[in-house]
Image (spheres, rainbow, N blue to C red):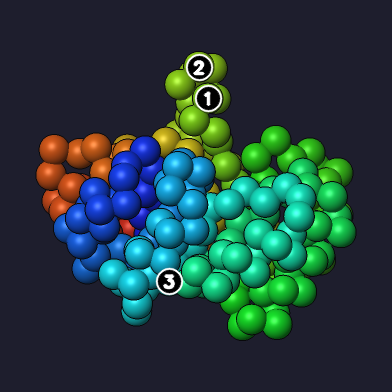
Amino acid sequence: MKIQLALDRLNIQDAIKMAKLVENEIDWIEVGTSLIKEFGMQSVKEIKKAFPHKTILADTKTMDNAKYELEMSFQAGADIVTVMGTAPLVTIKTCLELAKENNKKIMIDLLNTSEEQIQTLLPFTEAIFCEHISKDEQELAGKSNVQTKSRLREQAVIEVAAAGGITLDTIQNLVEQNLDVAIIGSAITKAKNPQEAAENFKKQIGGILS
């Protein structure tokens, strides 16, 4: 399982400092939606410049205007861009086509996506599928991923990620389901010792945390 570090609600330089602290323990770096909304594609450019050998994900949460948003993200240095599973099918298909043309990847965010919509998306096996519990659901509705079971893991040909309030106490649930990517934000970035927190996640995923 890969660790994707989600950088949100930070300025660009603080985001880079945070990522440098845990660089050796993580696999992918996510330029979060809040960073992109506040600082634009400059946030993607600077983080890719600081970590040229890391996979950089731009969490644009694209819903429309796919060609413009994807080309802008790829030009800024993103290796993966997110599109919402609830977006029009033509938007998702356009994202996938552009990713293929640029030798990049797409992550389909399944936040609030119905089972019927998911069935429509399953043929897109070149995409990463992200099962996502939103921040509002976590903070305002008390939802967590402690007992969440993947709706997709039985689809062996699909790369599956999970996001939303993942902690050291809940990561084992994802490990047991053999998911491919754990998207971790505040459990690392807001920890007293981010490096130690990231190391513990890596150990837990490797099954060597006592």
Residues at marks 3 and 2, CA–CA distance in whole angstroms: 32 Å
Residue 24 is left or right of residue 169, and the answer is left
Q: Residue at x 70, y 35 (%)?
A: 112
The image quarter containing residue 193 is top left
Residue 79 is left or right of residue 45, and the answer is right
- Asked if residue 173 can be seen in this view, the reply is no
Query: Which residue is labeled 1 in the image?
Result: 136
**Near-viewer residue (173 or 1):** 1
Q: At label 2, which amino acid type do we have?
A: Leu
In the structure shown, which secondary structural element does the residue marked by tag 1 occupy?
Answer: helix
The image quarter containing residue 47 is bottom left
Q: At label 1, which amino acid type do we have?
A: Asp
Q: At label 3, which amino acid type do we have?
A: Thr
Q: Looking at the picture, how far across and down is residue 18, in whole percent?
A: 23, 52
**Near-viewer residue (22 or 81):** 81
**Near-viewer residue (191 or 98):** 98
Query: Which residue is labeled 2 in the image?
Result: 140
Q: Which one is earlier in the sequence, the residue at label 3 or at label 2?
A: 3
Query: Contact (CB < 8 A) between labels 1 and 2?
Result: yes
Q: Looking at the picture, how far across and down is residue 138, in whole percent?
A: 48, 26
Query: Which residue is labeled 3 in the image?
Result: 55
Q: Residue at x 20, y 62 (%)?
A: 20
